[in-house]
Amino acid sequence: MLARFLPSVEGRRILYAYCAAVALFLIGEAVRPGFGSAASIEAVLVVAVFVGLVAAGQTFVILIGGIDLSVPWVLNAAAILLVTSSLGQNDRAPYALALTLGMGALVGLANGLGITLLGVPAVVMTLAMNGIMEGLTLGLSGGLTCASCASYAPPLIQQAVHGHAFGIPAALWLWLAVTVVVSFVLSYTTFGRSTYAIGTNERASFLAGVPVKATTVALYMLSGVFAALAGVMLVGFGGQASLGMGDPYLFQSIAAVVIGGVYILGGRGHYIGTVAGSICLVTLVSVLLAMNMPDYGRSIIYGVIILVLLLLYGREAPES
Amino acid sequence: MLAASIGIYCAIFYAAQQSFPGGFELTSTLNNTMPLVLAAVAQTVVVLTRGLDLSVGGMIDLTNAIAAISLGTTPASMIGWSLLILLIGAALGLLNGVLVAIGRLQPILVTLATLAIFQGLAIRVLPQPGGAVPDVYTNILANTSYPFSLLYLVLLGILWLAFRRTSLGVAILAVGNDEPAAKANGIDPVRTKILAYMLGGTLAAAAGLFLAATSTAGDATTGNGYTLTSIVAVVLGGVSLFGGRGSAIGAMLGAFVITMIVNILFFAHINPLYQEFYEGAFLVIAVVLAEGIGRFVRKRG
C-alpha cells in the first residue's frame, strides 16, 4: 500500500526498513524470550521516539543535501534550559517550553543564515555550532553546577512523556502526530515540494522561482526545533538533565535517516522511511543489550551495520 | 593570522606572567601541538581528494591505545611496534579508502561509521586509561628539554613539499580538482583515493604515537577531539573543503593557530568551560574571512 504513494524504488526501501524492524523483534524474541511481548515492544518504541524526533529534523536538512551536526548540544542545551527555566514548577512549564523550542529555532536560524548568506559549508557551520552550543551550555551552567541545574522537569512534562492515552504511551501519540504532519508537509505542500526540488537541483530550483535561501533557513530552523523537542522529551523521560545526553543522537539520527532510505545527497527519501530507520536502530540496540553486549561491541556492530546498509543502497551512481 | 595569534599570545603571556615566553614554553607548545599537526596533515591529504575523514579521532584513539599497552623498553620493541602501529594506521585508512573509492560511498558517512568501529576497538584494547610509555620513547619524540619537535616539524614540511611533486601528490590534487578530467588524463581516481586515505591513516597513527609519547600513557578517548580540531586546522590553513586546493603547510600553521588560541584563552583566564564556544566561533569567522578574501582577490584579478 505504501509503495503506491511513493516512487517504486524508495517505496521498496521503506518497506525493507519496516521488514527489518519486525525481523529484529523476532531475533530479539529468539535471543531473550519476552522481548517480543507488548510491554517490551512499547518500551522500545518509546525510546525510538527520541531518535525519531531528532531524525525528523535531520531528514529535512539531508533532503536538501545538507547535514546538521549541531544536534547533540542543541538537544543537551534544550534539556538544561528546560529544567533551569521551569525550576520543576508546572506553572512555569509553558514559558519554559516556549523558551526552549525558541532556542532551538534560533540556533537553526543561525545555522541556516551561516550556510545561505555567509556561504559556510553545512558540515563546517553545524560542526562549529555544536562547539558553540557546547561552550555556551557548559559555561553558562558552570559545568552543570548551577543552583537550578539540579531541578527536575515539570511534572506536567514528565506526565506527558510517561502517561498513557487509550492504552498507548503519550510519547507515541506525539510521534504519530509528528509523523503525520511531517509526511503531509513533505508530500502535499509547496514547502515540501520545494525541499525535494532544492535537493535534486539547487540551481534549477532557483531559476524556477523556488525561494532556495528562505527554504534552506526554514529547514535548519525545523531541525533545531526538533532537536530541542527531543531534549524536552528526554529530560521529561529521565527527570533530570545531564551533560553529554545528546551525544548518541548525532550518529543515531543520521543512521536512522540512512537506514530509512533517504538519499544522503538529497532529493530522494521520505520521513516514513526515517521512522522505520529509527525503530530498526533502537530495536537493534535493545537486542544487543539483551545479549549483554558490552559498550565497545555495540559501537563496532553499529558501525558495521551502517556500512553494510550503505553498501546495500547508499551508493553513488557509477561514473559514465 | 599565525603571526597575529603569536603576538597576542606573547602579549597576554607577558601580562599574566610578567615575562616573555622562553625556551620551555616553546618546547612544550611544540610538543603539545605535534599530534594535532600530524592529524591536520592527515586530514589535509583526504580533504584534497574532495573527501572528509571523521575517523581521524578514532584512528588516533586506537593507535594511541595500542602504543600504550605494547611499547617495550628495548629499542627493537619500540621501533618494531612503532612501525607496526604505522602499518595498522595504513590498514585503517585502507578500509576507509576502499569503501569510499570502490564502494562509491559518501566519505562523511563511511568515516562516521568507521569512527564508531575504531572507537569501539580502542576501548576493547584499553578499557581504562593507563599503560605506560617508556621514558626513552618520550625523550625521543617529545623531549621536554630540547625542541626536537622543531626538527620533526621541519622534516614534515620538507617531506610534504617533496610529496607534492611526486606523481601521487599531483594525482591527489588533480582528482580533488576535477575527477573526470584527471581520469581523462590517465590518472586512476580509485587508486589515488585509496592511497590518500591510507596515507591519512598512517599520519593519524603517527599522531597517536606522538600523543602517547607526550602524555606518557594511553587513553582510548583522548583522540576523539582531534576529528574536529583537525578539520578546523585544515580550514584555518586555507585548504578548500571542496578539494584540489591547499597545502599541508597551511594546515600545520592552522594547527599552531589553534594551540595559540587555546593558550591565549588559558592565560587570559577565560573560563575553560567556554573553550569550545570560542573554537566554534573562531572556525566560522575564519571560513567567512577566507571566503571573503578569496572573493576579493578574484574580483581584483
Image (cartoon, grey):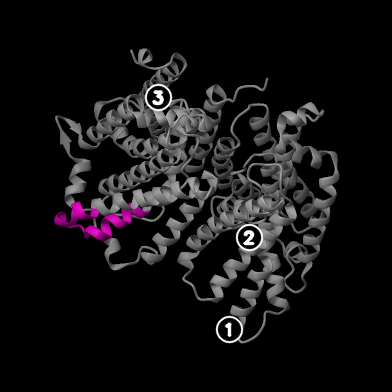
What chain letter is assigned to the residue under label 2? B
Disc 1 target residue:
B15
Disc 2 target residue:
B217
Q: Amino acid at mark 1?
A: Ala
Q: Are marks 2 and 3 on the same chain?
A: no
Label 1 residue SS: helix
* Residue A95 drawn in magenta: yes
- The one nearer the camera, B293 or B164, is B293
Label 1 with label 3: CB-CB less than 8 Å: no
Taking A263 as reference, is A225 above or below it? below
Q: Amino acid at mark 2?
A: Ala
Quarter holding residue B290: bottom right
First reached walking from the N terminus: tag 2 or tag 1: 1
> Would you call the spot at circle 1 few (<14 residues within 10 Å), some (14-19), or many (20 or more)?
few
* Residue A10 drawn in magenta: no
Label 2 residue SS: loop
Question: Who's the residue at 55% across and 30% down the image?
Answer: A307
Taking B9 as reference, is A213 above or below it? above
**Where does the magenta region start and end?**
A77-96
What chain letter is assigned to the residue under label 3? A
Label 3 residue SS: helix
Q: Are marks 1 and 3 on the same chain?
A: no
Q: Which mark is residue A24?
A: 3
Q: Position of residue A310 (x, y in %)?
A: 54, 27
Q: Position of residue A227 (x, y in %)?
A: 36, 45
Decide if residue B213 is in sight here: no
Q: CA distance from mark 1 to mark 3?
A: 62 Å
